[in-house]
Image (tube, coloured by chain):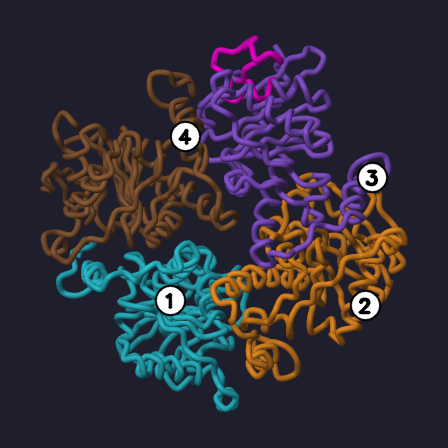
Chain colours: A brown, B purple, C cyan, D orange
């Protein structure tokens, strides 16, 4: 089932090492079929060299495996939660890309310091809190999803406008309209984390991008008056 | 029209990812035909893998599209302004190369700390101010060009001697006698931004290159007594 | 003798430059045959381009060469000591990978700041002290092994749970159930050293990973309740 | 003349971009024929893609071109001086490799913080002073050689034991028994400059390598009791 989607998810998982976002199997990509309420995700810990599209695993939004000869990524329940609660997203990526991990380990939101950021993220990318012992006992990966949803709610953020988050002490999750879009957001977030780190080292007083320029750049690429690209 | 120029501009756009200056479509290169008062530039947001020389767009110095089946780069009006006011330049490059972005986001001029800098830029590379709300309303990209020209005028800089600038919160523009030259200047600026960042971290008191050595290195490569290379 | 093991050790030595851990011949990998109480290691200072599996050297746990037409790696006596005293390990790697060297030269333990660390190392990776003049006189490389063993004993660390160490002023040793596992640990340690450096620069107060999350991540991948991967 | 030497020098120049030490034509390698008192060096500013072994230029120790259809590297007179005064060296390399430039621009000697350093450089690598206006007027490149020789004399350093130097505000020169050896020393110096920068950032109090370990590592690879490698 969902053969076409498996092929897409397989290809987008291969993008992670190709774009320098992961080593070994330290990441996972999924994409959803909103009509069937199912998503396809990478299997857990399988070598990229040996993995095929047929090895992808089909799951539902409650975190059950619907089809697959392998176990899904151990982070699958996080993806399930996000598809359930962020109804407009179509693809999800998790990595341990180094610069996003640096900000995650430092426990800091990624400020919007420049237009590279503003072209994709409409404001700072939040860093979610550590999970509690109780949440770990309930179910680490599903509760991670819950904490992400809670963070967006608490901060009144729109997951379409801010398509990503950091998990303290862990790393980034990004999402988008499909898996390819989510991978691109993972690349942008990694680049922004790198550039913002050095910016703040060079000038600890470097200002956030002024609101009017943030608005301009985000709207140049997104929304009804967008004029970037060919569409 | 301008088929030869389209081929050159196409090839030089491909140099940007090849030289590690951009990811995805985050940059653009143009070259001018001074006789015809037209320039050729990359189309907006088209995948490098699928782009051909025939997809390049021809524009005039007032920012009108003269020929092309695609929209030009959204930064096209900036290029138009620069060709109009910097009459000696032949090619322009814009990127989001990370180290130049770091200095842009920090809002700092790039000091001339070494001979790598002095071989190409005769003195510090300026960082232009943020645009105002009013300028955004007038036309973001064209006004960006105006601010670049204004910065060179205010600081009494010669765009031939200092072939590049940073835009605060955004990234670098470089230029040269043609597109290839402008790309090389983008590479030099990126390398200099990286080396100068670490130099100042290693020794916050590291001095600017003494004026007599700056003069020597710049003149070794440029002007009537140049003796570097084979010409 | 041990032809199969030689092939494995040869292949894993080639992984070092491929994974960006070494330049030239600045590293070595070995793997043990516990039944025969012998291990196979790379020869000293032989170009990777010209090296073959047949050039690998067979040694015993007292640091004697048992077979080989080349001298073994000059660090061979360190490997011998580790196989002798860490009875559960099957493969060893030594490199001068830059980020691990940075922490070694700084003389600092690598703290467990994130889950990338916790997936492999159950707690901080220790940095062992400089050797004394007396130890150098006794035998530099063998005494290096002794100091590693002593460090684990003094700190009551389990070499299976913390499969690596830094040597002050020098670089990392890692180990694992076989050579491939030890190489993976060398990659993880290098990545963690890089990310932790920048984390502490970004936020000097960035906390250690809370104990309950360290436990969770380590146990998700190791031990009897592990559920990562397909086994 | 010297066809074999031209081939060697050509090949070693190609190593510079391959090993990530230079961009474009920002470096040069030479090797000497001590019997004939001549050396072969790269031509100035010729594209590496188009350069052939036959394009190499033959010069003497007074900086005269003896044979060649191209102008030699503009740094040729520096090489000439070094061959003249450092009688034991056989090959020379100059680059603008970024980490060595960082230390050069900061005007700082590179301390011996670790064994990677001690395996090649017996003590700190000095940073020579800026040239004066008078020296520039006398002849920039030849006087650069004079300042290098002066620095080694003043500090009582042996160019065989410390096969390299930094020029303030410029970059590194390294040398060795032949061009290949000099290239390897350029790679080591670049790596050491990178690692030492981050070491001092991580721990501003990180100590120099103790003298007895510096001695041990240098002598393990050099001199009559060396036991590293196969010779």
Q: Which residue is mark 1?
A: C110
Give the CA separation, mark 4 to mark 1. 40 Å
Neighbourhood count class around disc 4 (C-alpha, 10 Å): few under 14, some 14–19, many 20 upward: few
Looking at the rendered image, the quarter that the C terminus of chain B falls into is top right
In terms of image quadrants, where is residue D143?
Answer: bottom right
Residue at horizontal 64%, vertical 75%?
D122
Q: Is residue B62 magenta?
A: yes
**Disc 4, SS:** helix
Specify whether A108 is left or right of D81: left
Q: Which residue is mark 2?
A: D150
* In front: label 4 or label 1: 4
* In magenta stretch: residue A139: no
Q: Which residue in the protein does label 3 denote?
A: B226
Who is closer to the viewer here, C90 or A108?
A: A108
What distance separates the C-alpha of mark 2 from that of mark 3? 28 Å
Q: Disc number at residue A211?
A: 4
Q: Are marks 4 and 1 in contact (CB under 8 Å)?
A: no
- Which of pointers 4 and 2 indicates the residue nearer the eye? 4
Q: Chain of mark 4?
A: A
Where disc 2 sits, the SS reads helix
Relative height, residue A125 to residue C92 (above, below): above
Q: CA distance from mark 3 to mark 1?
A: 52 Å
Residue A153 seen in this snapshot: yes
Number of numbered tags placed on the structure image: 4
| Residue at disc 3, secondary structure | loop
Q: Is any atom of residue C175 visible in this view?
A: no
Question: Dots 3 and 1: beta carbons under 8 Å?
Answer: no
Residue segment shown in magenta: B56-80
Badge 2: residue crowd in 10 Å (few <14, some 14–19, many ≥20): few
């Amino acid at each position: 089932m969902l053969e076409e989607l498996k092929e897409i998810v397989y290809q987008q998982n291969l993008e992670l090492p190709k774009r320098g976002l992961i080593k070994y199997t330290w990441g996972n990509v999924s994409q959803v079929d909103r009509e069937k309420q199912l998503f396809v995700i990478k299997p857990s810990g399988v070598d990229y060299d040996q993995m095929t599209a047929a090895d992808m695993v089909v799951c539902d939004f409650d975190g059950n495996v619907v089809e697959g000869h392998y176990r899904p990524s151990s982070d699958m329940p996080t993806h399930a939660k996000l598809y359930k609660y962020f109804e407009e997203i179509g693809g999800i990526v998790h990595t341990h890309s180094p610069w996003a991990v640096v900000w995650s380990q430092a426990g800091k939101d990624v400020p919007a310091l420049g237009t590279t950021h503003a072209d994709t993220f409409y404001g700072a990318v939040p860093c979610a809190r550590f999970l509690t012992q109780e949440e770990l006992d309930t179910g680490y990966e599903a509760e991670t999803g819950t904490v992400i949803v809670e963070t967006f709610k608490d901060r009144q953020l729109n997951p379409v406008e801010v398509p990503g988050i950091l998990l303290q002490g862990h790393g980034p999750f990004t999402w988008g309209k499909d898996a390819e879009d989510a991978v691109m957001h993972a690349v942008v977030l990694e680049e922004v984390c790198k550039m913002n780190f050095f910016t703040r080292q060079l000038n600890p007083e470097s200002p956030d991008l002024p609101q009017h320029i943030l608005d301009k750049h985000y709207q140049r690429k997104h929304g009804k008056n967008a004029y970037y690209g060919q569409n």
